[in-house]
Image (spheres, grey):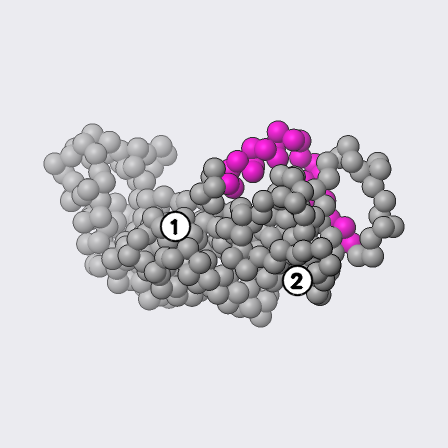
Amino acid sequence: MEILLIRYAEIGLKTSRVRSRFENRMKDNLIQMFAADGVEALVEKGEARFYVTASDLDAAIASARKVFGVASISVAETCDPDMESICACAAEYSKSRMVKGKSYAVKARRAGNQNFTSMEVGRSVGDAIWNANLDKDPKVDLTNPDILFYVEVRPRQAYIFQSYIECHAGLPLGTQGRVLAYVDDDRGILSAWLMMKRGCRVYVRGSADVSVLKAYDPFLKVLSEGDKAYKNLGYVLGLSVDDIPGFDQSAYDLPVFFPTVGMTDEEVAEKMAEIRSEAGLS
């Protein structure tokens, strides 16, 4: 059975207590994103991994990519975590993916108390793939293979896959408090998005269309004139480096953040085009 294997990055650097809290928030965010996008999926939290089962994996990937904290996703085939099952599964998995005359390699890793090493997994799986594809004249190239197979063995299951889909990483939305972002143009929108990537829930106020932000936070709070930003910890402004000399910090009663201050207008436009495309709004 194919599932989505979801990884995080810097969350793993936290203490066990904080990491557990962040993992729970990230799981909730995944579930809420799937619900908002109408994707039927089951999310299971494992040790340093999330496992997503869905009838439409492409739709699930598109949703999961928008969840901050997700560093990478792989579409993986699952099997029991014993050597015999892993080799049998990898051999069958490879049959539709090996190409006649092309070289291949296996990269394996494990986490748990198995009675075999990662190197033994790689060697045994490599042999199984070789024997299953003798009709395709296979070649082994550990340095620069044409085809690469990954095997990840964990205590309850093993996973076989071929690629990593890189995502935004960052911190789970809702783990770092709230800020108020002024969004009157693309630089303001991107500034708010970057604060969301750092785990902040964002209140937004301004004249810009914030549909792209709602795609990344289904519960985005848009304030009208006169609405209060409760529990606000700071302000977010879309200023460039050229705007800083005229900026008056004394006009604000809380810290002010400028996430895009080091970006050129061209870099802002490029990043906005990327996230709009990912959100399906290009």
> Helix or strand or loop: what does disc 1 sit on?
helix
User: Identity of the amino acid at label 1?
Assistant: Ile
| The one of 10 and 2 positioned closer to us in this rendering | 2
Q: Which residues are magenta?
A: 255-276
Residue 192 position, x and y percent, is 64, 48
Whether residue 166 appears in magenta in the rendering, the answer is no
Whether residue 275 appears in magenta in the rendering, the answer is yes
In the image: residue 218, left or right of residue 127: right
Tell me the residue at 84%/36% (across/down).
245
| The one of 278 and 222 positioned closer to us in this rendering | 222
User: Identity of the amino acid at label 2?
Assistant: Gly
In the image: residue 236, left or right of residue 211: right
Quadrant (top left, top right, bottom left, bottom right) of the N terminus? bottom left
The quadrant where residue 233 appears: bottom right
Rate crowding at label 1 as few (under 14), some (14 to 19) or many (20 or more) other CA atoms within 10 Å: many
> Helix or strand or loop: what does disc 2 sit on?
loop
Residue 248 position, x and y percent, is 85, 44
The quadrant where residue 126 appears: top left
Residue 149 position, x and y percent, is 31, 44
Furthest toward the right, the residue is 250
Tell me the residue at 45%/49% (across/down).
65
**Residue to which mark 2 is pinned:** 177
Task: Answer whether residue 108 is visible to the viewer in this image.
Answer: no
Residue 231 position, x and y percent, is 71, 65
**Residue to which mark 1 is pinned:** 61
Tell me whether circle 1 and circle 2 mark residues in contact (CB < 8 Å). Answer: no
Rate crowding at label 2 as few (under 14), some (14 to 19) or many (20 or more) other CA atoms within 10 Å: some
